[in-house]
Image: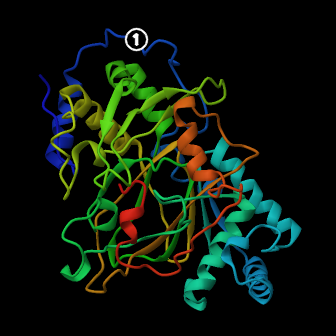
Amino acid sequence: MATVCASYNPSEFDTKRFWNQELTRGKASLQVPNGFPETLNSPLAWKGTDIKESQSDWKLDLTDEQIAAIDAALAAFEAEYEDLSLISASTFQLPDSFSKSLRKVSNQLYSGVGFQIVHGLDPTKYTQKQKLIVYAGISAHVVPQRGFIDVVAKGVVAHVVNVQAGNVGPKSTAPAFGNVPLSFHTDNCEIMAFFYLDTALTGGQTILSSIWQTYNELAEKRPDVLHTLAEPWVLDTFKSYDLQPPRHVRLLQKTGSDKVPVLFRFSRYPITGWQRKRNPDLPAPTQAQLEAADAIQFTAAKNGITIPVVKGDMLFVNDMALFHAREGFEDGGVPMKRHLVKMYFRDPDQGWSIPLSMESEWRTTYSPNKPDGTREETWNVFYEPGLEELSTLNG
């Protein structure tokens, strides 16, 4: 029986142990699960070493003229509107040529390598509210539909900070709200975005890896893992079950679409727990499930790319095509120095098909949340203690 890592943060020893086991593993006797593709052929299937030097494909450097246009759009919005929920491409108006160049970023997210950096902003010249206006305003030209980011379908922004900094925060939290490395995972949205208001003193870089490349390598060498992922799993939420009960899901599903034939959602945290332990009343992860979690983590890490973001950058990620992870970090004694604002988006013109089993979740994230068919958005301009408890998935 293979040895597995049952904890959230695999060690270097776990990494070496996994790859040593793979070297001695015989040829796979299984095929991929019935109806699943043998290979996913797309620019979205990549290795970090193959795209590392192609920054022109995944980084947009803003010009001085474009930054001035952003500042003008900000001033015009503030002069006419107070409610941030009114931010759209039409209320945050940019010159047509600039708007079109941002709109092309969506093509990269859905049909290119699946991520894009927008670089060149100085967040220190804006108030906290202005930062969110600029963030949401630019995003509206890239991917025009906002999603709700919390379990109550009200909030549209999440502040990703180390809530335990200085030993004054909660005794337990989710990994995303500490300073530990984050394992590779998805966020259960379509397009995820980060605005890096500030970065850590050391570490804390975001790492991306292609889900499609991971699928292809597992299909070739570990189809047994794909079989396990396509079976039912029980995931803990580490929240009040009145707020968010345990999730019964298949982590790998067919979509019925030729363009995007599979949907792969994964997080190690609800399988292993971290500071908060998995509910013993739930079925314990099986040996096969822990093996699958290891295979995903180590395969994704092997093919990942560390994203060269700096303070002021925005990062857009196709969460249906890429895993993301994070280095551990230190803030150098400055509480919550590393500060990211996360939002969910989608492009209705390019959005992918999803399995029927996920339609309810997608409606909760992207559809109106009022009985009369309207949306009521909560914009938490500043981080407030406890907000992290409402986040849907935290590493």
Left/right of residue 193 with respect to residue 134 in the rendered view: left
- Residue under the point 20% across and 56% down: 276
For residue 215, side relative to residue 153 (left or right): left
Q: Nearer the viewer, residue 197 or 122?
A: 197
Specify whether residue 244 is in view: yes
Quarter holding residue 265: top left
Residue at the outermost top position:
29
**Dot 1: few (<14), some (14–19), or many (≥20) neighbours within 10 Å?**
some
Q: Residue furthest right?
A: 96
Front one among 12 and 95: 95
Snapshot quadrant of residue 18 = top left
Tell whether 81 sits left or right of 10.
right
Which quadrant, please, contains the C terminus? bottom left
Q: Residue 16, position in %: x, y?
A: 18, 40
In percent of width and height, residue 114 lies at 59, 47
Outermost residue, front side: 371
From this viewpoint, is residue 320 visible?
no
Name the amino acid, label 1: Gln
Q: Secondary structure at mark 1?
A: loop
Q: What residue appears at the point 88 percent right and 67 percent down from the top-left corner? A: 96
- Which residue is found at the position 21% from the left and 33% from the top? 283
Q: Looking at the picture, does residue 217 appear above or below residue 173?
A: above
Q: Disc 1 marks which residue?
A: 31
- Reply above or below: 282 against 326: above
- The location of residue 211, given as percent across then percent down, is 47, 38
